Image (cartoon, rainbow, N blue to C red):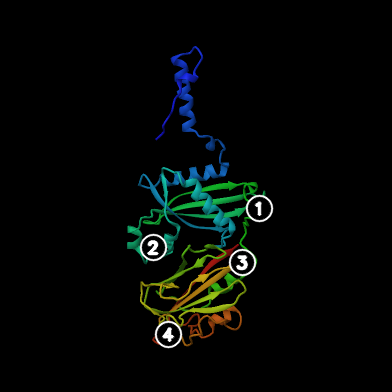
């Protein structure tokens, strides 16, 4: 609502009523278009807002409640400082949108679409309508190409996608686009993705951080890990830091029972733990490797202690597996695994 204070004594021309009318028109224009809005947003920000609102029109509600997923570099699944920069920019440009309502960022931790099949009822009742994901890459010109996708949480349907080009000149020099230690992180991930040559079965395990898969954390922020299994199983969770040091973080002295009920969620650390995972330098990509087995593991390493050898060797030590090509029998173990990456930036 606008209030106007009009001073007729200032109008000394001979236009009379016409001058008064013109003066009021000028005031109305000033109120509708304040001086602060005259400094135009960069074109890529305007295009982003228009693209997101355009995708939101494909949803059946007049106002779509949106949560941020992750913004990652190319097809690596890894984020960078630019990921957080984008999230903050979108928060600003969408804050006044009549079509899109932003949801609290931390609430996304239990809504990752990877878990839709296991938690279908939850997705149908949550207040969040859709999640915005992004993937960015550097063009030969040095500018950034940003691919956005808006996905419905209730149906998994892709509501729309858009390509936005961000001029390199618009990105602050302090913001790194490539993930720190990029080449090493890619090699480490390839080594850790498939540790077990086991017969395929119906056991499934998934993991996500409180900021989503491929998340980016700043120095001093806290990490929480959520692990889901679809069947009763025994669980091991390993952490691999930037330098390749490996530790078992679950089970541990605070939660020694590693048998998990199917459909249950394990949170590390939860409220029962007397500590939190605070992240800091060295900066770069770190990994969480989760292994689930229908039978108990032959060996349980000491939790929160550096394991000898390279990460792959350290993890596979003590895991009983079924060689490829063999048939799962009564004495065999059905296992499943997943790898989660996140990046720490300054």
Marks 1 and 4 sit apart, C-alpha to C-alpha, by 51 Å
Q: Residue furthest right?
A: 141
Query: What element does badge 3 sit on?
Result: loop
Point out the frontmost of discs 3 and 2. 3
Marks 2 and 1 sit apart, C-alpha to C-alpha, by 39 Å
**Nearest to N terminus: mark 3 or mark 2:** 2
Q: Mark 4 points at which residue?
A: 296
Q: In this view, does 192 lie above or below 28?
A: below
Q: Name the residue under label 2.
A: 116
- Please provide percent x and percent y for residue 219: 57, 64
The image quadrant where one finds the N terminus is top left
Query: What element does badge 2 sit on?
Result: loop
Query: What element does badge 1 sit on?
Result: loop
Query: What element does badge 4 sit on?
Result: loop
Q: Name the residue under label 3.
A: 283
| Residue 107 vs residue 276, the one in the foreground | 276
Task: Please give the name of the residue rendered at 36% of the width and 60% of the height, measured from the top-left corner.
Answer: 123
The image quadrant where one finds the C terminus is bottom right
Whether residue 160 appears in this view of the structure is yes
Marks 3 and 2 sit apart, C-alpha to C-alpha, by 32 Å
- Please provide percent x and percent y for residue 304: 52, 80
Whether residue 197 appears in this view of the structure is no
């Amino acid at each position: 609502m606008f209030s106007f204070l009009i001073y007729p004594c200032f109008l000394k021309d001979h236009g009379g009523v016409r001058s008064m009318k013109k003066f009021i028109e000028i005031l109305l224009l000033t109120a509708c278009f304040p001086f602060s809005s005259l400094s135009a947003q960069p074109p890529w920000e305007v295009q982003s807002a228009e693209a997101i609102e355009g995708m939101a029109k494909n949803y059946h509600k007049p106002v779509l409640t949106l949560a941020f997923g992750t913004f990652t570099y190319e097809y690596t699944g890894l984020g960078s400082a630019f990921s957080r920069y984008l999230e903050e920019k979108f928060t600003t440009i969408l804050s006044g949108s009549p079509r899109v309502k932003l949801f609290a960022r931390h609430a996304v931790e239990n809504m990752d679409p990877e878990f839709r099949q296991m938690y279908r009822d939850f997705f149908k009742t949550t207040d969040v309508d859709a999640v915005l994901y992004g993937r960015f890459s550097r063009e030969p010109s040095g500018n950034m190409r940003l691919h956005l996708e808006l996905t419905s949480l209730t149906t998994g349907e892709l509501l729309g996608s858009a390509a936005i080009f961000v001029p390199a000149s618009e990105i602050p020099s302090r913001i790194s686009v490539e993930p720190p230690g990029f080449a090493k992180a890619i090699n480490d991930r390839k080594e850790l993705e498939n540790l077990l040559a086991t017969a395929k079965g119906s056991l499934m395990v998934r993991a996500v951080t409180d900021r989503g898969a491929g998340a980016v954390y700043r120095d001093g922020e806290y990490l929480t890990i959520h692990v889901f299994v679809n069947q009763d199983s025994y669980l091991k969770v390993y952490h691999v830091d930037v330098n390749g040091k490996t530790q078992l973080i679950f089970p541990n002295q605070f939660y020694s029972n590693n048998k998990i009920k199917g459909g249950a969620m394990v949170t590390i650390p939860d409220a029962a733990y007397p500590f939190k995972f605070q992240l800091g330098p060295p900066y770069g990509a770190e990994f969480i490797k989760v292994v689930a087995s229908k039978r108990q593991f032959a060996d349980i390493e000491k939790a929160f202690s550096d394991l000898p050898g390279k990460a792959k060797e350290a993890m596979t030590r003590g895991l009983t597996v079924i060689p490829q090509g063999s048939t799962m029998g009564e004495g065999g173990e059905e296992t499943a695994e997943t790898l989660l990456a996140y990046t720490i930036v300054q």
